Amino acid sequence: MSGNKFLLDTNILLYVIGKKIDILALPEGEFYISFVTELELLSYPSLTAGEEQKIRELLREIPVIDISQGIKDKTIQFRRQHQLKLPDAI
């Protein structure tokens, strides 16, 4: 693997999950996501259980640059319940 490191944004992961792009089409390197991307992916109010499972499977494969799990759980809960913008929910 090359020494390149990439921080993937939410849209790229949505394209991968939706099979609009093949993950193999991405450049060679190490991939990461931020905790913000994880929160964005999991906090859509209309997210189905199947979609959530696909997202969680993908997230198990990509390291997350993180904050505490407690803050993430509350943020996801607040966004789903109150439709807050992400920064406000965090």
Image: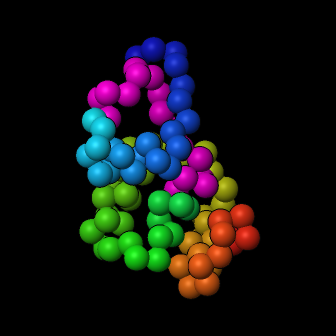
Query: Could you tell me residue 64's position as x and y percent?
Result: 54, 47
**Residue that extends furthest to the top in the rendered view of this protein:** 2
Query: Could you tell me residue 46's position as x and y percent?
Result: 40, 76
Q: Residue at x 29, y 51 (%)?
A: 18
Number of numbered markers = 0
Q: Residue at x 41, y 22 (%)?
A: 27
From this view, report whether residue 81 is shown above or below residue 72: below
**Residue that extends furthest to the right in the rendered view of this protein:** 88
Query: Could you tell me residue 45's position as x and y percent?
Result: 46, 77
Q: Residue at x 50, y 49 (%)?
A: 10
Residue 84 included in the magenta stretch of the image: no
Question: Left or right: 22 with respect to 74?
Answer: left
Asked if residue 52 can be seen in this view, the reply is: yes
Residue 30 included in the magenta stretch of the image: yes
Question: Left or right: 23 with respect to 3?
Answer: left
Between 78 and 73, the one lying in front of the other is 78
Q: Quadrant of residue 85?
A: bottom right
Asked if residue 60 can be seen in this view, the reply is: no
Q: Residue at x 56, y 85 (%)?
A: 81
From this view, report whether residue 44 is shown above or below residue 34: below
Quadrant location of the N terminus? top left
Quadrant location of the C terminus? bottom right
Q: Which residues are magenta?
A: 23-38
Query: Could you tell me residue 40's position as x and y percent?
Result: 53, 61
Question: Left or right: 66 with respect to 17?
Answer: right
